[in-house]
Amino acid sequence: RFPRVRGKEYDEFVDKFIQAVKKRFPSAVLHFEDFGVTTARPILERYKNQLACFNDDIEGTGAVVMASMSAALKITNRNLLDSEIVIYGAGSAGLGIADQIVNHMVAQGGITPEEARRKIHCMDRRGLIKDDMHAESNKAQQLYADPASEWEGVDTTCLLDVVRKVKPTTLIGCSTQAG
């Protein structure tokens, strides 16, 4: 056993691999399978304009969930813009799902990304992502942060309490709870 390679050495290895794929298979679509939370989004952002690529958690899971939501909304005669969404799990998959929902709200409803994000409430292992949690959350999570001032007196670490306050029309689970 040995520690995972990280930092500059990791980035150089990934870049060497990407350059080799681009040279040998210029028409290929590269799938980043199960890259970690700290590496998936930065790698996707870095290479998305260099070659056709996607991340299974961020984009694949998000696309499947959005397709399921679209079908459910159609069957129930509801509008996506009327949705309030709680996502339990704010890792790569949860944030990818949130991103897909925002993209659809913007494209179909003509609202801004900020307006769409206000309809999505993300929770991670520490609870609801709030705007006063900069040290505990990452940049992608902070896009979905709820104003802490709106949650005073609510146990934001408890899914049931978050659901009681939000009254979501959609609850998405992409995490587990220990025990």
Image (cartoon, rainbow, N blue to C red):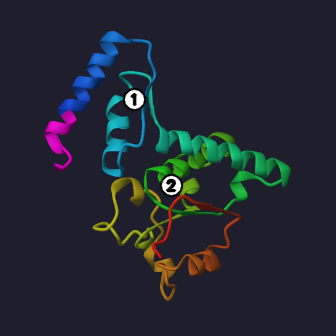
Measuring from the top left, give residue 86's x and y in whole percent. 59, 65
178 is within the stretch colored magenta:
no
Mark 1 element type: loop
Above/below status of 86 relative to 26 = below
Name the residue tied to disc 2.
94
Mark-to-mark CA distance, 2 and 1? 20 Å
**Residue 146, numbered label:** none
Measuring from the top left, give residue 25's x and y in whole percent. 38, 12
Q: Residue at x 31, y 44 (%)?
A: 39
Left or right, 58 with reference to 39: right
Q: 94 or 134, which lies in front?
A: 94
Name the residue tied to disc 1.
48
Q: 14 or 43, which lies in front?
A: 14
Magenta stretch in the rendered image? 1-11
Measuring from the top left, give residue 121's x and y in whole percent. 54, 65
Please state which amino acid type lies under the numbered disc 2.
Answer: Gly
Above/below status of 52 relative to 108 = above
Left or right, 175 with reference to 13: right
N-term mark: 2 or 1: 1
Above/below status of 115 relative to 29 = below
